[in-house]
């Protein structure tokens, strides 16, 4: 009974070692031979994020330093972690800058719209003949 329980994990490991192409080939063949298995395999690939991540389960077991495997050189790993942290901080500040820029543009466009609306309303009231 234990061999029955382990064959799915053995198949999963075998496919992981061969990469994303092997998963896709297994899914296509499953659809050809028995579509419910293909559908189940597609659902599993999406649920486990194998379909979109570009990396297999074996690549998810790296060290916690930004998802990268340790190089074995602690000084380089520290430098790499620091550089990645700085790049992430720079990206966050750039995204905040873009957000402020969009908000300023939106405010400018809104103010221009309100000014045009007020000018149109003033012109409409000045052109109306007043019955006295």
Image (tube, rainbow, N blue to C red):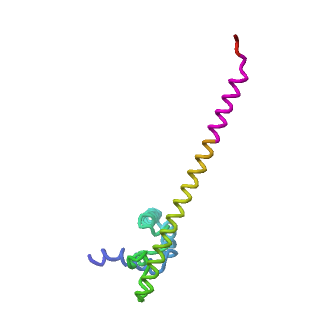
Q: Is residue 83 left or right of residue 5?
A: right
At x 51%, y 64%, the residue is 93
Q: Is residue 26 left or right of residue 101?
A: left
Residue lying farthest to the top in this orientation: 132
Find residue 48 and report its horizontal and vertical position in percent.
41, 67
Residue lying farthest to the bottom in this orientation: 73
Magenta region includes residue 42: no
Query: Could you say which is closer to the camera, residue 104 or residue 19?
Result: 104
Q: Quadrant of residue 78?
A: bottom left
- Say above or below: 26 vs 71: above
- Say above or below: 35 vs 66: above
Looking at the magenta stretch, what is its main secondary structure? helix
- Say above or below: 47 vs 114: below
Q: Quadrant of residue 101?
A: bottom right
Find residue 46 and report its horizontal and vertical position in percent.
45, 64
Quadrant for the N terminus, please: bottom left
Quadrant for the C terminus, please: top right
At x 47%, y 75%, the residue is 84
Find residue 19 and report its horizontal and vertical position in percent.
49, 77
Residue lying farthest to the left in this orientation: 1
Find residue 17 and report its horizontal and vertical position in percent.
45, 81
All told, the count of numbered labels is: 0
Query: Could you say which is closer to the camera, residue 2 or residue 57?
Result: 57
Magenta region includes residue 121: yes
Q: Which residues are magenta?
A: 112-129
Query: Could you say which is closer to the camera, residue 106 or residue 61?
Result: 106
At x 50%, y 67%, the residue is 52
């Amino acid at each position: 009974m234990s061999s029955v329980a382990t064959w799915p994990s053995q198949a999963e490991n075998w496919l992981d070692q061969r990469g994303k192409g092997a998963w896709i080939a297994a899914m296509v063949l499953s659809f050809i031979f028995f579509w419910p298995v293909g559908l189940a395999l597609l659902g599993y690939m999406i649920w486990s994020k194998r379909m979109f991540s570009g990396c297999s389960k074996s690549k998810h077991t790296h060290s916690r330093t930004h998802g990268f495997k340790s190089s074995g050189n602690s000084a380089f790993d520290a430098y790499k972690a620091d550089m990645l942290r700085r790049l992430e901080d720079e990206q966050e500040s750039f995204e905040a800058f873009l957000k402020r820029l969009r908000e300023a543009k939106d405010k400018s466009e809104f103010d221009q719209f309100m000014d045009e609306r007020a000018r149109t309303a003033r012109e409409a009231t000045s052109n109306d003949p007043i019955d006295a």
